[in-house]
Amino acid sequence: AQSVAQPEDQVNVAEGNPLTVKCTYSVSGNPYLFWYVQYPNRGLQFLLKYITGDNLVKGSYGFEAEFNKSQTSFHLKKPSALVSDSALYFCAVRVQAGTALIFGKGTTLSVSS
Amino acid sequence: SQTIHQWPATLVQPVGSPLSLECTVEGTSNPNLYWYRQAAGRGLQLLFYSVGIGQISSEVPQNLSASRPQDRQFILSSKKLLLSDSGFYLCAWSVKGQISEYFGPGTRLTVT
């Protein structure tokens, strides 16, 4: 079955430190990869996507993600975390255009001051 | 630019009562539309998706139904709510042939 795994329920980092939120996937073919962020009681906001090309994708709010095909991973990163980055982060894949997104379970990021 | 609206923002309903949640998209035509449920603050589950008026696909069997009476309107309904229907309901849309999906602000449903 096709799936997305976010192995960490929660990631804790201090403000100013780099952060990584992990995502691995198990789907056939060459999927499209996404990261979304959700603040409490809000909808999902798009952060970035990988379609093809450069393995390092830059997105909103200083976030970036590294695609690794051999490891089937798409980890979200930021060089210097902010307290305002604290939120729930979802990794998602789309196998092909027109099919539904497959979401991971989400990772709560907590940035302390 | 395109926008997506959901209402109501919050809803508290007793068990056994009916439900109607509405989603509309502006600034685009013939979108793909989706309903997701998020339980306990995480874990998005796709409930329904629609590729056109009157065309609804259900991902999981459940107490809910969906309808698309107009091109940019997507409605989630139930005849009798269960406690397990509580959650955060998100509507989303995408352009046909494109891969990005955009989410609405969500509706928090509490069944008491």
Image (spheres, rainbow, N blue to C red):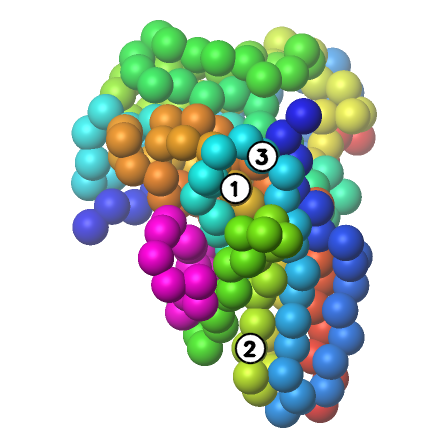
Q: Position of residue A78 (x, y in %)?
A: 55, 77
Q: Is residue B111 magenta?
A: no
The answer to whether one can see residue B98 in this image is yes
Quadrant of the snapshot with the C terminus of chain A: bottom right
Quadrant position of residue A1: top right
The answer to whether one can see residue B6 in this image is no
Contact between labelled residues 3 and 1, with CB atoms less than 8 Å apart = yes
Answer few, some or many: residues within 10 Å of disc 3's Cα (few below 14, many 20 plus, some between 14 and 19): some
Mark seen at residue A93: 1
Of circles 1 and 3, the one toward us is 3
Amino acid type, label 3: Val
Instruction: Name the subunit of mark 3.
Output: A
Q: Position of residue B69 (x, y in %)?
A: 33, 13
Answer few, some or many: residues within 10 Å of disc 2's Cα (few below 14, many 20 plus, some between 14 and 19): some
Q: Secondary structure at mark 3?
A: loop
Quadrant position of residue B73: top left
User: Which residue is found at the position 40% from the left and 23% from the top?
Assistant: B74
Which residues, given as a range, are shown in magenta? Answer: A41-58
Q: Is residue A46 above or below residue A63?
A: above
Mark seen at residue A78: 2
Q: Position of residue B92 (x, y in %)?
A: 43, 37
Amino acid type, label 2: Lys
Along the polypeptide, which appears first: circle 2 or circle 3?
Answer: 3
Q: Which residue is mark 3?
A: A27
| Whole-number angstrom distance, CA of label 2 to CA of label 1 | 20 Å
Amino acid type, label 1: Val
